[in-house]
Amino acid sequence: MSEFKNSDIMQATAEFFSNIPDPNINPETKEYSEWETATMYWASYPIGTRARQSWEGGYWEKTKSGWKWFCGDTLPTPGAADQVCFPKH
């Protein structure tokens, strides 16, 4: 049985978190507006809009079928999100 050192755990943790996508970068366009306070009904936002909880990582992206979590499922609304940003075209 091998023993882990604190540096091994820190390295593994850093590698894990480095693989989480940056919520400010879209792999297709890579350009989004600055985050701003969400002020409309979720259904009113255009496709491609991103929503996030200002106190947490990750984001939801508006699709034709709802709001898709950046690494998961699509739901009708982006939960408790309070900020949005828009793709620059």
Image: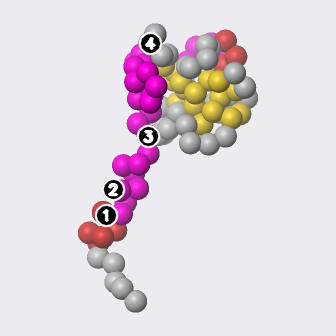
Label 2 or label 4, whichever lies nearer to me, is 4
**Cα–Cα gap, marks 4 and 1:** 37 Å
**Which disc is residue 14 wearing?**
2
Q: Mark 1 and mark 4 in contact (Cβ < 8 Å)?
A: no
- Secondary structure of the residue carrying numbered label 2: helix
Q: Earlier in the sequence, mark 3 or mark 4?
A: 3
31 left or right of 73 in image: left
> Magenta segment range?
12-41
Residue at (55% x, 26% y) in the render: 51
Residue at (26% x, 69% y) in the render: 7
The vertical placement of 89 against 68, above or below, is: above
Q: Which residue is mark 1?
A: 10
Mark 2, other Cα within 10 Å: few <14 / some 14–19 / many ≥20: few
Residue 28 seen in this snapshot: yes
- Secondary structure of the residue carrying numbered label 1: helix
Q: Mark 2 and mark 1 in contact (Cβ < 8 Å)?
A: yes
Q: Position of residue 38 (x, y in %)?
A: 55, 18
**Cα–Cα gap, marks 1 and 2:** 6 Å
Asked which quadrant contains residue 16, the reply is bottom left
69 left or right of 43 in image: left
- Secondary structure of the residue carrying numbered label 4: loop
**Cα–Cα gap, marks 2 and 4:** 31 Å
Give the residue type that dot 2 points to: Ala
The vertical placement of 49 against 75, above or below, is: above
Q: Which residue is mark 3?
A: 21
Q: Position of residue 11 (x, y in %)?
A: 30, 63
Residue at (44% x, 45% y) in the render: 20
The overriding secondary structure of the stretch rendered in magenta is: loop
**Cα–Cα gap, marks 2 and 3:** 13 Å
Q: Which residue is mark 4?
A: 88
Determine the residue located farthest toward the bottom in the rendered image. Answer: 1
Give the residue type that dot 4 points to: Lys
